[in-house]
C-alpha cells in the first residue's frame, strides 16, 4: 500500500527537524499529551493514522513543534476506512482479545498502541527466566524472543509484562540485543511496557532477535506463577524459575489456561531440581497461557 499524504508529510517534517521520536514524545508530554514513539513510527510509515480526539490534538501540537503551518498535517488525514493493514490489525486485536478478553488490563496498559501491538510480527520463539529471592519475590526477569517480520518497515518490538508487585520500586531495564526505547511503568495497571528498537527497519520475511532483562529494586510480594500467553505460530517456548536456596516451594505444577478467566487445564506436577530450578518446555503450544505455578510452605496447597 502506498503511504498516505499524511504519512509522507509527517515523515518529511520529522526528518527536516532532525528530532528523534522519543524527543518528539517528550515535547508532547511537556504539553500534556502522552504519545509513544511506536505510535509516531506507525503514523509516519502509514501503518495507522490519528483518529481519536487525543491523537488529533497531538497532531496539532506536532505542527507547532515541527514548525509547520497550522492544520497542514491535520488536513491530510484521510477519513477512516478499512484497508489491507487495518484488517491485519483487526486480526491481531481479535487474537489478543480471544485470550485476555475485551477491555483487559493488557489493553488498557497499551492504550492507543493496542491495535498495533507487534502487529507486523509473528512470534517464533520465547524463553523466559525468572530469579526469586529469599523473600519469595521475583527480583529479575530475563527474556529472549525471535520474531518473523510480516511487513516491511518494522523497526521495534514492544514487550509487555504483568508485575506481581506493582510497587516494587524503580525498574532497571537492560537490553542485550536491540536498543532500549521508551519504558512505561504504570503501577495502577500492574504492567510495564518496554520498547526495543531494532538496528534498522526490517524487510518482510526476515527474522529478528531481541533479549532484555527487568531488574526490580525492592519487590516484596511473594510470587506464585510464571506464565506466557501464546497467540499463534509460536514454535518454541521455555519457562524457567530459579528459587533461592533458602526459599524453596513445597510443590510446583505446569498448566495450560485457554483464557484469562478460564480454569487451568493439563495441570501436572513437575520437579524442582538440585539447582533449585523448575522449567517448562511444552511440546504442544495451544493458544492461551502456558505456565508454572508453585506453593510456599505455610500456604494452602
Image (cartoon, rainbow, N blue to C red):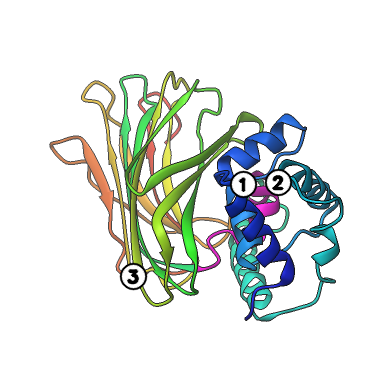
State if disc 2 and disc 1 touch (CB < 8 Å): yes
Label 1: which secondary element: helix
Looking at the image, tell me whether mark 3 or mark 2 is earlier in sequence order: 2
Label 2: which secondary element: loop
Looking at the image, tell me whether mark 1 or mark 3 is earlier in sequence order: 1
Q: Nearer the viewer, residue 163 or 117?
A: 117
For mark 2, what is the residue?
66
Q: Nearer the viewer, residue 116 or 102?
A: 116
Image quarter where the C terminus lies is: top left
For mark 1, what is the residue?
17
Q: Main secondary structure of the magenta part?
A: helix
In the displayed structure, 66 sits above or below 224; it is below
Q: Is residue 293 magenta?
A: no
Residue that extends furthest to the left in the rendered view of this protein: 274
Residue at horizontal 62%, vertical 59%?
11
Residue 50: x, y in percent? Answer: 76, 59
Q: Is residue 109 magenta?
A: yes
Residue 177: x, y in percent? Answer: 31, 49
Image quarter where the N terminus lies is: bottom right
* Image-based side of 43 in relation to 277, left or right: right
In the displayed structure, 190 sits above or below 120; it is above
Residue at horizontal 49%, vertical 64%?
154
Amino acid at each position: 500500500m502506498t503511504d498516505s499524504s499524511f504519512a509522507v508529510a509527517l515523515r518529511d517534517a520529522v526528518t527536516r527537524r532532525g528530532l528523534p521520536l522519543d524527543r518528539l514524545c517528550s515535547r508532547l508530554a511537556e504539553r500534556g499529551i502522552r504519545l509513544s514513539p511506536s505510535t509516531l513510527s506507525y503514523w509516519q510509515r502509514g501503518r495507522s493514522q490519528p483518529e481519536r480526539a487525543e491523537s488529533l490534538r497531538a497532531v496539532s501540537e506536532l505542527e507547532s513543534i515541527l514548525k509547520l503551518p497550522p492544520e497542514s498535517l491535520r488536513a491530510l488525514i484521510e477519513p477512516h476506512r478499512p484497508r489491507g493493514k487495518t484488517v491485519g490489525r483487526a486480526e491481531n486485536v481479535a487474537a489478543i482479545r480471544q485470550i485476555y478478553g475485551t477491555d483487559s488490563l493488557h489493553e488498557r496498559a497499551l492504550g492507543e498502541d493496542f491495535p498495533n501491538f507487534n502487529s507486523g510480527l509473528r512470534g517464533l520463539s520465547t524463553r523466559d527466566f525468572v530469579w526469586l529471592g529469599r523473600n519469595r519475590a521475583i527480583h529479575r526477569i530475563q527474556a529472549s524472543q525471535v520474531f518473523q517480520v510480516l511487513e516491511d518497515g518494522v523497526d521495534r518490538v514492544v514487550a509487555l509484562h504483568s508485575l506481581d508487585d506493582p510497587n516494587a520500586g524503580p525498574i532497571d531495564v537492560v537490553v542485550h540485543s536491540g536498543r532500549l526505547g521508551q519504558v512505561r511503568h504504570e503501577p495502577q495497571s500492574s504492567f510495564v511496557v518496554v520498547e526495543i528498537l531494532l538496528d534498522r527497519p526490517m524487510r518482510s520475511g526476515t527474522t529478528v532477535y531481541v533479549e532484555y532483562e527487568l531488574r526490580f529494586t525492592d519487590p516484596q510480594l511473594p510470587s506464585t506463577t510464571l506464565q506466557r500467553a501464546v497467540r499463534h505460530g509460536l514454535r518454541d517456548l521455555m519457562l524457567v524459575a530459579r528459587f533461592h536456596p533458602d526459599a524453596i516451594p513445597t510443590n510446583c505444577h505446569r498448566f495450560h489456561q485457554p483464557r484469562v478467566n478460564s480454569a487451568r487445564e493439563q495441570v501436572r506436577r513437575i520437579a524442582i531440581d538440585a539447582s533449585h530450578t523448575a522449567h517448562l518446555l511444552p511440546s504442544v503450544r495451544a493458544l492461551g497461557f502456558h505456565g508454572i505455578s508453585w506453593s510456599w510452605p505455610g500456604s494452602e496447597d
